[in-house]
Amino acid sequence: MKIEIINGPNMNMLGIREPGIYGKTTYKDLCGMLEKYCGEKGVQPHFFQSNCEGEIITRIHECYFEKVEGIVINPAAYTHYSYAIFDALKTVNIPAVEVHISDIEKREDFRKNSVITPACVARIAGEGINGYMHAIDILVHKTYKK
């Protein structure tokens, strides 16, 4: 199974950016952990991170042509207003799981709304980096309703 793991703006700064909220694990460490986890599950992961909305949209489109079978996406700040990412996910019709390291429901008011969620088969928030593994499990075991 091929899974794309997409991370949005500022995720490259994990371990540096507000470690009290996002933890001390770096982006490189996160990718290494997920690579190992995917290997144990028989999953082929591909990692993509961008601080640019258009690059994320282009990568989602490429997933369609590359026959990717699932997307794990942490859209970061784009969660709250990127109808373009929402549209891209709907366009490719690949099962996607939205992930947030922190619990967006317990943060600032603007973070509580996700325009991305309706384009996804599940949303995971507040599980720290373990949320990514949970998302992979959802996609591997197809434990979503669509």
Image (tube, rainbow, N blue to C red):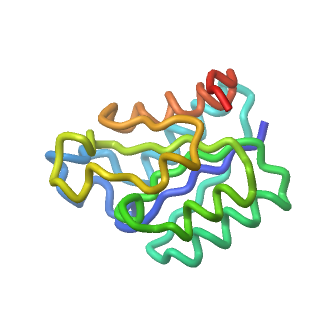
For the image, the number of numbered tags is 0
Quarter of the image for residue 54 reads bottom right
The quarter of the rendered structure image containing the C terminus is top right
39 on left or right of 101: right
Residue 23 vertical position relative to residue 78 in the rendered view, above or below? above
Nearest the camera: 121 or 46?
121
Residue at coordinates 33% horizontally, 31% vertically from top-left?
127
Nearest the camera: 121 or 36?
121
Residue 16 vertical position relative to residue 112 in the rendered view, above or below? below
Q: Position of residue 134 (x, y in %)?
A: 50, 28
Residue at coordinates 76% horizontally, 65% vertically from top-left?
62
Residue 73 vertical position relative to residue 56 in the rendered view, above or below? above
Residue at coordinates 62% horizontally, 44% vertically from top-left?
96
38 on left or right of 13: right
Q: Position of residue 105 (x, y in %)?
A: 24, 41
Residue at coordinates 62% horizontally, 26% vertically from top-left?
144
Q: Position of residue 56 (x, y in %)?
A: 57, 69
Q: Position of residue 136 (x, y in %)?
A: 59, 33
The quarter of the rendered structure image containing the N terminus is top right
